[in-house]
Structures are given as C-alpha cells and as structure tokens.
Amino acid sequence: MEVTEITAAKFQDMVRIGAHRLTKNAEFVNSLNVFPVPDGDTGTNMSLSFGSGAKAVNESNAKSVGELAQSLAKGLLMGARGNSGVITSQVFRGFASSVAGKEVLTAQDLTAALMSGVETAYKAVMKPVEGTILTVAREAARAANKQSKETTDAVVILQAVVTAAKKALAKTPDLLPVLKEVGVVDSGGQGLVFIYEGFLEGLSGDVVADDTYQPDDSEMDEMVNAMHHQSVQSQLATEDITFGYCTEMMVGLGEAGATATFDYEAFRNHLDGIGDSLLVVNDDEVVKVHVHTEHPGTVLAYGRQYGSMLKIKIDNMRLQHETILEQDQANEAENAENQEPVDYGIIAIASGKGVGTLFKSLGATTILNGGQTMNPSTQDIVDAITAANAKKAIILPNNGNIILAAQEAAKVADIPVEIVPSKTISQGMTALLSFNPDNSLTDNQEQMTAGLNDVVSGQVTQSIRDTTIDGLAIKRDDYMGIIDGKIKVTDTTRAQATINMIKAMLNEDSEIVTILIGEGGTRQEAQTIADAVMAADDELEVELHDGGQPVYPYLVSVE
C-alpha cells in the first residue's frame, strides 16, 4: 500500500499502534537489563512514557499532524520516566518541531522530522554514548534520508527505518563491550525499534491494530466494572498494582488458524496462573476473557491457539490509576497555592517508608515515592515541586535513571530549581548534610553536589540469571554486592555477600557504616552483619535503620 501523505488519522494510528507494540513487549525490553538484578525497568519506563504521549494524541481534537505531534511531544515529556523515557521524549520533541504547522506529512517531511528528532536527542544528552538508543535513532534516520531521495512513499521510508534500526540494534554489543559480555542488545534501542515497527504497521495498514476494541457485550462489561475498575481505584499507590495490564480478548473457537481443541477447565486453569481478576465466559462458538496480567502478549498468544481473534483490548492500569490520582494531586497543588510559600523546598525521591522518614529527619521537605523499577515521570516531579509550596527548590533524584527527568522538570517548573545529581540513597542523605538554608540556591547546589563524593554506596540484591560481568561469574539466585554502580562481590548467602561488600567498601579513613534494612532483609541478620564488620575493625561505628525499600534487602553507606 503506497502512502504519499500521512494524514492526522494515519498519524494517530501510527502512535497508537507504536504504543501498543511497545507495551506488549515491555517485559522483553526489561529482560535486556545489563545487570542480572530484578529491577530492569527500561521497557516499563519507555512504555509508560510513550503511553503518556499516545494518551495525549488520543485525547486531542487536532486535525493536523503538526498539532498532533505537539501533543505527542508534550505528553511524552511530562510522562517521561527514566533516561530511556526522557531520551525518547527528546526524539519526538525534535520530530514535532520539524512538522510544526503541517496539515499532512510527505515522505520527505517524515524524513526531516526523524533527522530533527535525532539532532534534538543528541543535544539533550551531555555525554552521548554510542551503542544506545541514540545510535539506533540516528541510523534509522540516516536510512530514511537515503531512501527519501528515491521515493515519495512514506511506507517505503518507514520500512527502511525499521530495517536500519534493527541492524543498528544488532550492532550495539560491538559498540558497548558490556552488552557483548552479557550477551544482550541495548534495551532502549530495542524499545525504539518496537515503536518504529508500530509506526510502520499503523501507516501501512498491513497489520490490524489489536487494541481498538471497545467491549459491547453487556455481560463482560458488568463483570469488568465490578472486578476491575473498582479494584484499580482502591489501590493505595500506583506501584502497588501487581498485574498492570487489563487484558480482554474474544476468540472465535475453531476458526482459521486454530491449533488446539478448547477445554474450558484447562483453558481457565492456564490463564489463572499468569494473572488475577480472571473471567472466562464461553459458548460453543466464542470464548471471552478478562484478566489482569503483566504479560498481555502471553495471554493473546495462548488464546490464538484456539481460533481467530475477534476482539482485543489492553489497558495499562498503572496509567489509569495515575489519571485517577491526577485530581487529588491538582487539589493538593491548589491547597498549597493558598498557603504562604516556604523559602526552600527539598524534594527527595525515594521508596520505602523508613527511607522517607530518614530523609525527612535530615531536612527534606517533600518525599516523592519512587526509585528503582518505579521511576517518577517528569510530571510527577513537577507536581512534587508544586506541592513543596516553596520559592525555590532542590531535587535529590537518588537514582541515576531519574536525573534526566528531574532536569526536564526543572526546566518547566514555575520556580527556580536546582538538581543535586545523587545516584543513590546514601549519596542523597550525605548531600543533605551540606545544605545551608542561609545560602543561595546555586551555592547549596554546588556544596551538596561536592558532598556526593564523601560517601561510598553499596546495594545488595539477588541475580535473576547466569552471566559474567567484568570477569565476575554470577549464577542465578546468587546475592550480589554492588558498589557505586559496579558488581564487586557475589555469594550464595545474603549475609555473607553483604559482609564481603562492606569490607570491600572500607578504607583507612572509614568511620561510619550505615545499613538500611529493606524488604527481604531482617533486623537479626543485619545485626549479624554489623557484628562481623565490627569484628574486622573495632573502630568502626555501625548504624542500623529500617528502610523498607524494595528490591534491595540492604542498602549500605560508608563514610
């Protein structure tokens, strides 16, 4: 199918299917995390970020591609999570800038927009690294540019984009040695490939979109309303949603392509093992399914064995829940505006009740719940700045994957904001010790940033696969000690891995060891660890605190 003009309707299809393709493959993208830790979140971040942009496009009444692209860019920016999400938002910010004012896009317009997106993304990253999403975006745009000299068909352009993006992705391990050592391609680059594949599907029409179904069966509607929508709103926090995708499908039993014979009990029991809130309704011709799962693609693939897909619908419940919370956040912001603003707001991003309490005790005025596996979006950070009700603010990201989103939030905030680029909880807490309320915003930022070097940070977690990193052989389920972002020790037991890690963190100037006990750790085990450390150096002071943080049973700082 030849397409010489991309209309607003076609562009909406491209964005919608791009978002869907990325979402259904988010877990695969997560699995490409270099470190074998249970916190790979690139796929989650990118799908939530692009999903925010897709939502803005879907809700727009614009009739031109230029206006829709602006909606996509704004939605992506405000929903951007993690470095991958922010970089993706910059790609489409440049895209939108290039097509501003255009009713429709030609193949050449599309090419220029892709090139502009690459230029904007590279400028947004202080130290661009090859072998990442940036490389994939650049090579895809170059292929589009080359192809545009020979065709006016936008479908052909996107075919070249997808082909080049896949080739560039396959070469990322040659550009980043750690990818080759671990045996994966770049996760952000893979996410972008899924987006571009969705664009091609949406433009060509060769693949029918599978997320356009709006259920019209009253029986299924009633059950979904009873079991799904109410349960979503009852969640205490978005990150509490265990199964994030509401997946519905209707399968024509025994129709073309069926490879299995339908048996209700076996069918239901299988799906019951990969989610919750399961509903299965069938007659002789059709089976209808509603389930909450983290793997919607697995559900669809299973259903496809029994016949043809008649209707499909996938909703991201985490995004739905955030929408539900938007009004509450708006009300909080309105209340804050009615109060006299404080001079300084210090926003610490952290997860774990105990960790939040510690930050408060050190002077943080606002705790934004987030961290590894649940990076807050640009909008989340902007809302936290507003909620701080301050004349100026300092943000402590406390995670390297949140710094870019914090920087973007600072750009759009209504008050002066500085970022102290803390990459760990320990760094954030140490930086707070250098804060002086009588100093200027710039002076505080400089002094607090300088304080980041005064602490060594350690994290203990469990490996999710066999791998080798920096020559260190790691087995699945081993416990790893990560020191300032590098895996340094492994052991089969959590306590010994923590002890070995702390000993590796010490030097002759070390005085205080602080251990934050998270989920999976215990006070008793932490005391055993402390005793072992003090036995090795009786001049050390060891402090234990209940952090409650997820993913890492123990967070350790050495000063």
Image: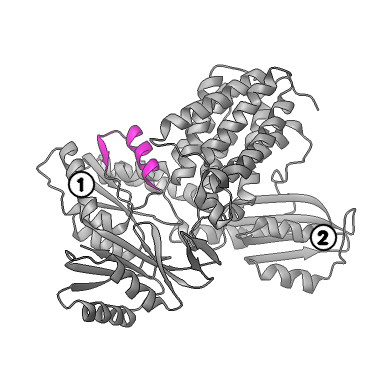
**Image location (x, y in percent) of residue 104:** 65, 19
Taking 444 as reference, is 366 above or below it?
below
**As drawn, 347 above or below 60:** below
Mark 1: few, some, or many residues within 10 Å (few <14, many ≥20)?
few
Residue type pointed to by label 2? Gln
**Left or right: 358 in relation to 399:** left
* Residue picked out by circle 2: 305
Magenta stretch: give its range: 402-419
Q: Quadrant of the C terminus?
A: bottom left
- Taking the image as shown, residue 375 lies to the left or right of residue 172, namely left
* Mark-to-mark CA distance, 1 and 2: 59 Å
Q: Position of residue 407 (x, y in %)?
A: 35, 38
- Give the residue pinned by disc 1: 450
- Position of residue 370 relative to residue 344, above or below, is below
* Residue displayed at 54% across by 57% down: 182
Disc 1 secondary structure class: helix
